[in-house]
Amino acid sequence: MMNVEKLRSSPAWLAIRDRFYETLDGEACIRDVSELVEHEVLRVLSDAVKDPSSATGQALSRVALYACGGFGRSELYPCSDIDLVFVHAPDASSEALRAAVRPVTQALWDLGLEPSHSVRSMLEVTQFQAGNTELYLSLLDARPLAGAPNLLLSFEKARAQLLREKRDRIAGRLFDLIDARWHTFQHTIHHLEPDIKDGPGGLRDLHSVRWLSLLKQESPFWNEPGRWLRFERKATAHIAAVRCFLHFEERRNQNVLLFDPQEEWMELLARRGRDASRWAREHYRFARAIYREIERWEERFHSNTSALMTGIERWRNRLGNNDFSVSRNRIYVRNAALLETDEARVWRLFAFVGRHGLELGGDTVERVARFLEQPDLELGRHVRVRDALWAVLEMPHANVAIRAMERTGFLAALFPEWNDIDSLLVRDYYHRYTVDEHTMVCIDALCELGRGQRDLDPRMLDLAEQTQSQPLLILALIFHDIGKKDGVEGHAERSRALAGKALERIGVEARDAEAILALIGHHLLLSTAMRTRDLSDPGTGREIARAIDNLPLLRCLTLLTYADIRGVYPGALTPWRMDQLWSAYRVTQVVLEDQVARERIGADGDFTAEQLSFLEGFSTRYLRIFLPSQIREQHELYLAKLRGEPALRLRQQERSFELIAVSADGPGLFAEATGVLAGMGQNILLADAFRNSQDVAVLRFQFEDPSRSLTLNPSDQDALVRRMDRVLRQGEKAADVVPRRGVPRSPRGPRRMEPYVYARNGVSPTLTMVEIGAPDRQGLLYDIARTMAEQDVDIDVLIIETRAHRAFDTLYVQKDGTELTDTEQAELIAALLRVLRS
Amino acid sequence: MKKIEAIIQPFKLDAVKDALKSLGVAGMTVTEVKGHGRQKGHTEIYRGQEYVVDLLPKMKIEAVLADGQMEDAIQAIVGAARTGRIGDGKIFVYDVMEAVRIRNDERGETAL
């Protein structure tokens, strides 16, 4: 008998191995290995029963021997286990048989094979036991090797009956096993070091589709059975080749394609004239198709069987609307044919996904695919893409919607740049996923913050609450690694350039696009600082602040970095790294806050002497906000003011208005100006106020016109300018020039927020910083400014932002030319909170 | 043989690694740790609330060296990790009784 070394070094074995390395034909290899091993198994069995009078011979003559698993399928990999099942008649003793088969299995061990065998009574096959479903699954591939004809026949009958009667139980158990296995791989196919056997979309799943097809007596891809068979052959050939390679190289049943063997495999492919660069992407595409096929089977299975979920189902059904219904946690289209041609409906579908966090049903996926197959498809022909996209990205489960868009191909249709990172494998000892999946995991992490998930870091939850910029951040994440298609080095800049074109194409407003591009271009800034810079040194903060020059953008970058780290692998954002990220944020935040308060423009720059005199004393933030052309225009307004003429300009923008005014500063000036806008029903989105060393104030307001009175009536615009001029130039009160309209409406946002007011000294010798957050409402800023004026507090610099029905204001204030005392701060905070809560 | 355990500022990790490599010290273990010595942390105010940050992020580098390399390695770490400010860290040195390379059972300094 051969020993271990003899089998592995036998001419037949070496010939199989050499043929494989020559042709890379994995299917032929597993067939040949299977035949060789079968030959050896039968030889060993024959040796064992050579003496029919012996106990072993007598016992073995009364069993049927079956090959299971890969051996049963005649697809045995070089180092796989040899699955054998000895089935005996009901009247025989399993115990006696176990002793009888021992010499057989020992002989196989001696051959260097790894038999994994069991001895079963025919009763175990005929009488279903719920705890034994793995056995029944293994019987799906069982192939008879030897045995008494009557036993083989009985077995076939029993197996057929069992599978017919218990198919749903067995299939249900199979789905449980699949789910548990997928869970260990985070339910994603996109691992950089994939397990090609057990990983999602791997060989085990390919076999599972075959088993489900046998159990349910239905074809995969049920509309086109032949299509699945063609696919299965290709997928098997693809996986078999790399798995045979791994087994030969590692000399064991090793199925994880680690980086080193990956490189060796790529080199081998290249030596054999194959396109190695295409191989990795093909691998993930096969895996994706297999994974989705399993999902389809599961969806069909549960739609037919589960009664347990009926209660939840009823509740879910109530989520439906005129367009969509919900069944078994999946979304279906009520008038499916309309979806194939109606872009607005497709966008509404993704917004619906984003609202409820539910997956698309298989039929819905097909319908969206057909929508995309229209020959003259042009997204945005009947829909304003930017607005439709925002409606999706603002949703609490926008991450689920983005995954649905990716799955249906809609994301790549919207952003063809996405194809650059589809299944893109960039080898890196830290990242676990392909670039596209990493991006998706980042978006998942971001949206968890947006939903306020309680188990997350409270500091990040707080930043997310303040920021409310989910659409900008998701777009920045979608594009942040797009440039990796040409390598990691310099990818941030390439990503930024590609994103710039895409954002312009879909009509993202300049201000938003600028923020998104800054986030993409600097997406490595904080993570690099975390590793390489002293985070207690204000110099680090100043350096970061040179690139990220305002607090809202810094908050966004911090959130983006948080999501980017969490997308590297589960657990990548350790508490240690979280603290480092927070330190990087804080050291920059303090610098930015202090800059606003301390840094003043000096007498230099590309301006005339007159203009420089006008600029003297403004915060440096003023220079960052306004372009030189705008500054010159404001200087013109200043000159108009000196001549005693109106010094303000109103401009209509795409969806809002901008008012710039220059005025002598005075008590309550800002409050009165906001009062005019509030009184005329305008909703202030952004406001800035600056004061130079000559006590000249520049006020800028961006506001929307909810009733469209200004938009539709040019005379109302004139009235606004006249009234504002009376307040600013002639010192009249807002209440005297314009009657305030009605009671402000309550905000109708996704979530209410509790107002807060914080104050701190130390940002400059003369200023106190006040931070305010509150639900936005008409007249809010007026109320804040008026309260300040009532407390004799002067506003030196004001920065307000309004997002998602929430207003976030940062004010730098003083009283009698100096910072507020503790008592004055407490009084101001109490007065502001009274107003904000009223 | 000696084991060196260096607690350093996180941003000095690359410099220390490079300095050790230039001495021929190839193997080391790096761990993200938190702690404090005399530095003792500090109090932060964020949005009106006070937070005590008592454990500060540091990096721990562990390397086992031949006896003759120890002094050079200490000097290399000190040179690379020093900023002159509180919080630069500490180096601890231990005697090592034995080293075993698991792959081939090599012992002593050859296993390093």
Image: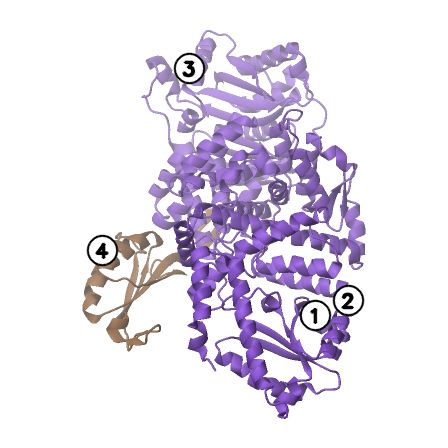
Gap between marks 1 and 4, in whole Å?
A: 67 Å
- Whole-angstrom CA distance, mark 1 to mark 2, is 10 Å
Q: Is residue B1 visible?
A: no
x 47%, y 20%: residue: A697
The amino acid pointed to by label 1 is Tyr
Q: Residues within 10 Å of mark 3 (few under 14, many from 20)?
A: some
SS under mark 4: helix
Residue A573 position within the rendered picture, expressed as x and y whole percent measured from the top left:
48, 54
Q: Are marks 2 and 4 on the same chain?
A: no
Q: Kindly identify which residue carries mark 3.
A: A632
Between the residue at mark 1 and the residue at mark 3, the CA separation in whole angstroms equals 83 Å
Discs 1 and 4 share one subunit = no
Query: SS class of the residue under badge 1?
Result: helix
Disc nearest the viewer among 1 and 4? 1
Residue carrying label 4: B79
Report which residue position mark 1 lands on: A136
Whether residue A677 is visible to the viewer of this picture, yes or no, is: yes
